[in-house]
Image (cartoon, rainbow, N blue to C red):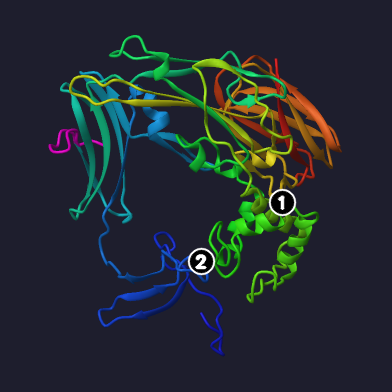
Amino acid sequence: RVDENDNYRSNEPFMASNGDFRRPIDLAFGPDGAMYMLEYGSVYGVNNEDARLVKITYNAGNRPPLATARIRDARADSLAQARSWVTSDRRYHAKVIREVAGAAPLEVSFAGNGRDPDEDDTMSYEWLFDGNNVAATSSNARHVYTEPGSYNAVFRVRDRAGEWGSDTLLVRVGNEAPEVAIETPQNKSFFWEGEPFDYSVTVADAEDGDVDPSDIVVEYAYFRQPDQREVGGDRLLPATTRAWGETLIAGSDCKACHTVDAVSAGPSFTQIAERYKTQDGAIAMLAGKIVGGGGGNWGEVAMSAHPQLTQQEAEEIVRYVFSLTDTTRGFAPLPSEGSLTLEEHSEDEPLGRYVLRARYTDRAAPGAGPLTVEKVITLRPATVQAVYADEHTGFPRWGNSLSGGKHKSHVMLRDVDLTGIAGFTFGYDAWGVPGEIEVRIDSYAGPVIGRAQYVLGEDALTRAEMDNPVRGSHDVYFIVRQPEPPHKEVMTMKTVKFEKE
């Protein structure tokens, strides 16, 4: 859309759902009717590996359906932690299990789902349990495998035009997966200052019999920031726990001129940290340059100003850049039983995590290869800053804190072990009319396990006692209730401390 003087006004979203554009710089239509787009790549001033020429064609008419499949059998749970992924957003959280193993005969329950982008289309389903022969024609199915071996179970979806979509699951028959457990009498989600963590790792395997403890790999590490490349394994930490400075960088143009460890139009983040990290006042000085712009220290390319950032936000960016050169210890070996002192953290590391993991690879079985199972425990500080919760619906984030929330706003922590928890202490600011914090588990409308009354004030505290002890892992919702007007910005939640029995 342009105005009467041909000045740009707006444009419609182009390929919003399936486009993956890397800084387009030119495009043209070819004589074949296709659009050719030249993409510069992700980073300015370097030899971009993702620079490319893209051909975009319009596929009129029917579009093929999409197929997704998963294993519903409970026997898959032992492999789930090492061989599944977790999909999370505000509405959905589940482990999608894509592999199962067990001794023959092995009965497996499958679930399939088809989605067709053409809304008026119809679909049919097929399961090929051995990867070759159609054996079921419903979206959900069960099958018994009697012969040892590895099988690709294929789920296919076909629309009425004959277009196919498919997904493949792995079934390994003939070897029962080992059972690995990290046993502890303590809570498996949090650590408390000065309290060691006692553990013992047990392994049982139907084919191996007695397991030599020396064959069990046990190790642990402390991470100041969540980093899946370092932690590995299943999804351990929610995406919302990343540092605020990293979030600000992701939403700005910083990466157009800077990378973590390569020189681009500007120096790498690592170079910046190595030069300035030990200098007094460096955080405030560099933040001022980010906001106001500057140049001359690293070459001829000047850094543009970022007046949309506050000084506080710019300082968070600098702190994150400096953290990239922090020394983070890797995993250290441990005996299969012992006690961890948990003394590597500092009080100012709210995202720090102790990770304890145990892994065992069995000795295989006739007709079936070896299986590896890994279990992980991740311990976070018992005082959780609300801004780093998995959800904070109704509480807008502002820097490293949450803004005021209205009636029915909530903070949610996912997969929290409540074993040994006696109550919750909330740090908050409240205005307007006093109200209540309600604690529910498993869903926003789940059972109430505690309530705390809050009064007006800043940097205030209130405590909710557990009505009855609760054990095991649950999603925990902390919901603000204040139905009297005014309803907006009645309070902001700052911290939630999990209190031991």
Front residue of this view, candidates 488 and 191: 191
Q: Residue visible at 62% across and 59% down?
A: 271
Q: On the rendered image, what quadrant is the C terminus found in? A: top right
**Rendering coords of residue 179 (x, y %):** 39, 18
The residue identified by callout 1 is 398
- In primary-sequence order, the first of circles 2 and 1 is 2
Is residue 81 one of those drawn in magenta?
Answer: no
Residue 360: image quadrant is top left
Around disc 1, counting alpha carbons within 10 Å, would you say few (fewer than 14), some (14 to 19), or many (20 or more)?
few
Determine whether 473 is above or below 157 in the image. Answer: above
Report the side of 45 relative to 35 (left or right).
right
Whether tag 2 and tag 1 are in contact, CB under 8 A, the answer is no
Which residue position holds label 2? Answer: 43
| Residue at the (14%, 37%) spot, across then down | 134
Segment colored magenta: 128-139
Mark 2 to mark 1 CA distance (whole Å): 28 Å
Residue 118 circle label: none
Q: What residue type is labelled 2?
A: Val
